[in-house]
Image (cartoon, grey):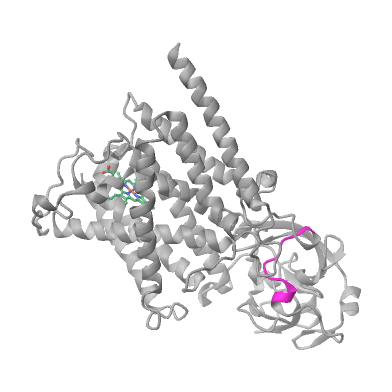
Amino acid sequence: MRTMRTTRALLVLAGLALTGCGLYGIATDPYIDLAQHPFDILRWAIGGLVLHDGLWVPLACLAGVTLARSTPVRTGLILAAAVTAVALPAVLRAGHHNGNPTVLPLPYLRNWLLTLAAIALLTTTWALLHHHRKRR
Amino acid sequence: MDDDTPAPRRKPYDLPLPTPPDVLRRGPLREGTFTSALHEPRTAVVIGRWLGAALLTCFLTGLLSHVLQQPPTWLRDHLPSRPVNGYRVTQGLHVISGIAAIPLLGAKLWTVYPKLFEWPPARSVLHALERLSIAILVAAMLLEVFTGLLNTLQWYPWPFPFRQTHFWLGWLAVGGLLLHVAAKAPLIARHWRRVRPGLAQRRAFLTAVTASVGVVTLTTAGQTVPWLRALDLFAPRRPDLGPQGLPINRTAVQAGTSTVPADWQLTVDGPRPLRLSLAELAQLPQTTAELPISCVEGWSASAHWTGVRVRDLLDLAGAPADARLQITSLEKDGPYRVVEMPATYARDPLTLLALRVNGQVLDPDHGYPARIIAPNRPGVLQTKWVTRIELI
Ligand code: HEM
């Protein structure tokens, strides 16, 4: 009990200190120049929160109760979402390298579609086996 | 959600807040909106641990990178030039754990999503503050991984400066994490260990999340881990693609250094100042070393560099052993046109003014006629198109 209380107190102190550093840094950084651009970061931070919690997670929850009723399908959708989150910027950005062709040199669209296809194939096979086993 | 949890006891110094009238409890705020059995603390703890570990890894490696790039005065002369691959490993780890955090963050936030619609929205002032800190944590985390990922593609669609914002958001995220762990500590402690029998659904979900982390790691880490190169499907770089088999961060055209003046000479300050043409440099004793280019953006590639030891040049110029260097590039502008090099690096026998890479004369994109390459250094400090070395 005692250790728990001490640990929590220390965590709160350290957490407040780091948060304070972060806020102070944003407020005083000459490149961020908060006085001239007071809402740039805030707008993007709140925008991310709103898009994630207001659009993406509701869609994911909806998919969870409609499409993804079995473990294989659920797993496949989770994998596809993870791969897409990481790959989509490269897919969208392919070809934009500001004159430096060593940036984004790969066929990202092809790689993304092939990976999704592989995930779909694996999970379909798994789902069929799963189904088959259940019926026996 | 956590039915087994007694409502937290209000602290004597905390002020209770009234519960809003029940007519306002609509939509997702109603009881029973979320039906999955996985919106529960044990799942949150298991994923949270990994997410916390990824965030702390990012924070520590990020701080290190920051210090190496912009050393504070008191630390400047104590930065070690070894191990050779130190920065390559830490910065590679930074980007690898940042990418791994993407599926972990998604899974964690899905797990705890019903908490967003908790009723009453704030039981007390302290609870309201906790929820505010959660909002800061989540907003900082989302923006942090988003800006980090896009920076590796050199894509900057936002109006604020990347480097400074990414740095300070890291402090907010870790601060928020510590507050979050403090607030949830009793719950975390209660669910730290697995209780048997486990929940089959949870095991399946955690397996899917683990597999997701595995897939995104394996398909991107090849930009820095040599034996994963064949699996590099989504990373913005591949370490063997580029002029002379090496990627570049800034091309000669971008830097305005495609044509080097015909009378180019390297100037080295010192008690016996030197002015050396390319032919004269090539006459000096040459050293070959295998050293990595390790970019802040998380890719790295090893190459065989040949050139004159910086230490030898300094000795020729009669520079004192503890001299720090200021190295100037032919670049017209850019934040790294002039960089400082502490004596620990300047005196390292592996620090070269390279004239060749992998046996060939440097491509303009790699810094022709001469570039700096030193062990354990961020790529942006490996000055290309060197024209002047001064002592400070
Ligand atoms: C960057 C890291 C993290 C983020 C962004 C995050 C995010 C969240 C959010 C938004 C909530 C809901 C808060 C609420 O209103 O009650 C939550 C709850 C929770 N988190 Fe985290 N978290 C992180 C790390 C961790 C870590 C490291 C642990 C533990 C090892 C953890 C354990 C928990 C627990 C136990 C809950 C409560 C779940 C419940 O009541 O069902 N979290 N987290």
Question: Which picture quadrant has residue B251?
Answer: bottom right
Residue at image location 40% in from the left, 66% down from the top = A44
- Total numbered circles: 0
Magenta-colored span: B245-254
User: Is B161 contained in the magenta span?
Assistant: no
Task: Name the image quarter holding the C terminus of chain A.
Answer: top left
Q: Is residue B324 visible?
A: no
Q: Position of residue B340 (x, y in %)?
A: 63, 78
Q: Position of residue A51 (x, y in %)?
A: 38, 57
Q: Position of residue B246 (x, y in %)?
A: 75, 60
Question: Which picture quadrant has residue B260?
Answer: bottom right
Residue at image location 27% in from the left, 36% down from the top = B35
Is B86 situated left or right of B170 in this image?
right
The residue lying furthest to the top in this view is A136
Residue at image location 43% in from the left, 29% down from the top = A71
Task: Name the image quarter holding the N terminus of chain A.
Answer: top left
Residue at image location 60% in from the left, 78% down from the top = B335
Towards the viewer: B168 or B308:
B168
Q: Is residue A75 visible?
A: yes
Is B104 situated left or right of B318 in this image?
left
Is A31 situated left or right of B314 in this image?
left
Towards the viewer: B61 or B135:
B135
Q: Is residue A79 above or below residue A46?
A: above
Question: Which picture quadrant has residue A49?
Answer: bottom left
Kindly report the secondary structure that dominates the magenta region of the rendered protein: loop
Q: Position of residue B273 (x, y in %)?
A: 79, 88
